[in-house]
Image: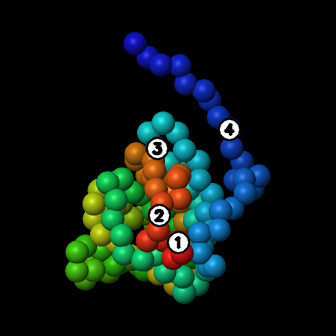
């Protein structure tokens, strides 16, 4: 038996930006089993090393991010506009914005820590 879903429409430009750090903002859209986010990173900003159960696709629209992947961070990748990085569940990763960057992140399932504000690794409170 299927459940009834509500169709939702969003326009990025109409959505408020959430300030995550003094150099990183984001906008988030969440469905039942996926999350889509615009992440705005100023040049030089850092996303500290972390991992999560959520599978992640990172699609760079503008700019470039350098990633350090794996337990030892030795797998380094630069992802530029028009490129996508697929990060499997539980793979440790860190990123640095090499220039002002807009990335689209897709998570499955949605990041509960982003929804409830418990993403302390990121927020540097």
Q: CA distance from mark 4 to mark 2?
A: 26 Å
Q: Are marks 1 and 3 in contact (CB under 8 Å)?
A: no
Examine the rendering and report whether any part of residue 90 can be seen: yes
Secondary structure under tag 1 reads helix
Give left or right: position of 46 versus 22: left
Q: Out of 22 and 27, give the one closest to the viewer.
A: 22
Q: Are marks 2 and 1 in contact (CB under 8 Å)?
A: yes
Note whether 48 is above or below 90 in the view shown: below
Q: Are marks 4 and 1 in contact (CB under 8 Å)?
A: no
> Looking at the rendering, in which quadrant would you find the N terminus?
top left
Note whether 44 is above or below 5 in the view shown: below
Give the mark nearer the N terminus: 4 vs 1: 4
Q: CA distance from mark 1 to mark 3?
A: 22 Å
Secondary structure under tag 2 reads loop
Q: Out of 102 and 30, give the one closest to the viewer.
A: 30
Q: CA distance from mark 3 to mark 4?
A: 15 Å
Estimate the x, y position of residue 31 in percent, counting from the top left: 52, 39
Q: In percent of the image, x 65 and y 34: which residue is there? A: 8
The residue that label 4 is drawn on is 9
The residue that label 2 is drawn on is 119
The residue that label 3 is drawn on is 34
Residue 63's disc number: none
Quarter of the rendering containing residue 27: bottom right
Q: CA distance from mark 2 to mark 1?
A: 6 Å
Q: Out of 95 and 57, give the one closest to the viewer.
A: 95
Give the mark nearer the N terminus: 3 vs 2: 3
Residue placed furthest toward the top: 1
Estimate the x, y position of residue 100 in percent, counting from the top left: 61, 79
The residue that label 1 is drawn on is 123
Q: Residues within 10 Å of mark 2 (few under 14, many from 20)?
A: some
Q: In percent of the image, x 40 and y 45: which residue is there? A: 109
């Amino acid at each position: 038996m299927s459940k009834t879903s509500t169709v939702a429409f969003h326009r990025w430009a109409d959505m408020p930006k959430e300030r995550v750090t003094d150099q990183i903002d984001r906008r988030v859209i969440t469905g039942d089993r996926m999350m889509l986010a615009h992440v705005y990173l100023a040049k030089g900003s850092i996303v500290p090393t972390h991992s999560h159960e959520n599978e992640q696709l990172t699609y760079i629209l503008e700019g470039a991010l350098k990633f350090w992947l794996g337990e030892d961070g030795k797998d380094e990748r630069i992802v530029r506009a028009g490129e996508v990085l697929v990060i499997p569940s539980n793979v440790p990763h860190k990123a640095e914005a090499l220039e002002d960057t807009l990335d689209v992140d897709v998570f499955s399932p949605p990041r509960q820590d982003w929804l409830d504000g418990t993403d302390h690794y990121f927020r540097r409170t």
